[in-house]
Amino acid sequence: MFEKLKARLHRLCEQLDDFVEKEIGSLFADADVDSSNEISTEEANHLVEQLQKHNFEFTIALRCFDTNRDGKFDKEEFARALRTALFDRPENLDLLVTSSEDIDNVLKEAWTDAYASTDALISVPDAARLTRDVLAELGHADTEVEIQSDNGLSSKDSFGNGAAKADFAAQVGSFDGDGDGRLTRDEFSKMYTRFLAKVYLLPAPQASKAQQSGIFKKGDKDKNAQGVASF
């Protein structure tokens, strides 16, 4: 069950950008009241006001993304503005991810597929280990991640350090509402959506030496054989 759930959650991480793109498209459609495939200044201002009511803030004025200065926003300009807001203010990304019905549905399906019951529970240590394993599979085994940054906890070391592992488990445990050391499906989903928002902001992992380009591999071989590189 553990490996089955982990595989589905890993896949969800890989699909995350598709879900973010879909949410951005939905926001564009909501703002495009007249279905013109463009958002007027008035429509844009109304959208900003509505988003602000849900604590979504633009750190840069939306008009700055009107690249051709025609007073309207096409889908590309709008997407650029939204993605800038997501990266400039992590709370925006957290709001978007936790509000996505698609992500919520995938998490519920993954849970039911693994446990065959919505009433099943997962221990806090297992939930922490599962999440760390997914992070490692994504190439971030030694990356600092705080999924609950507002509870006084702080992961100052990498996951490879024992103290950091305990700290991370405590962060996962903060989602355990009744303090019984186990998470319900909904508690686990809430924790994992917070984790997804953090993972989305991580840079792509650096390629290892084993993934060195064939061009450089050939050059190294030629250098070893002849004493000088052939390029």
Image (cartoon, rainbow, N blue to C red):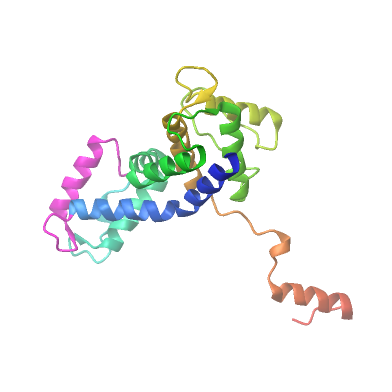
**Horizontal and vertical percent for residue 194?**
45, 37
Quadrant in the picture for residue 3:
top right
For image coordinates 23% across by 35% down, the residue present is 53
Q: Is residue 166 visible?
A: yes
Q: Is 3 located above or below residue 219 in the figure?
A: above
Read off the magenta span. 32-58
Q: Quadrant of the C terminus?
A: bottom right
Check residue 37 for magenta coloring.
yes
Q: Is residue 144 visible?
A: no
**Horizontal and vertical percent for residue 56?**
30, 40
For image coordinates 51% across by 51% down, the residue present is 11
Q: Is 194 located above or below residue 151 in the figure?
A: below
Q: Nearer the viewer, residue 212 or 12?
A: 12
| 71 sits left or right of 180 in the view | left
Q: Is 189 located above or below residue 134 in the figure?
A: above
Residue projecting furthest to the top? 179
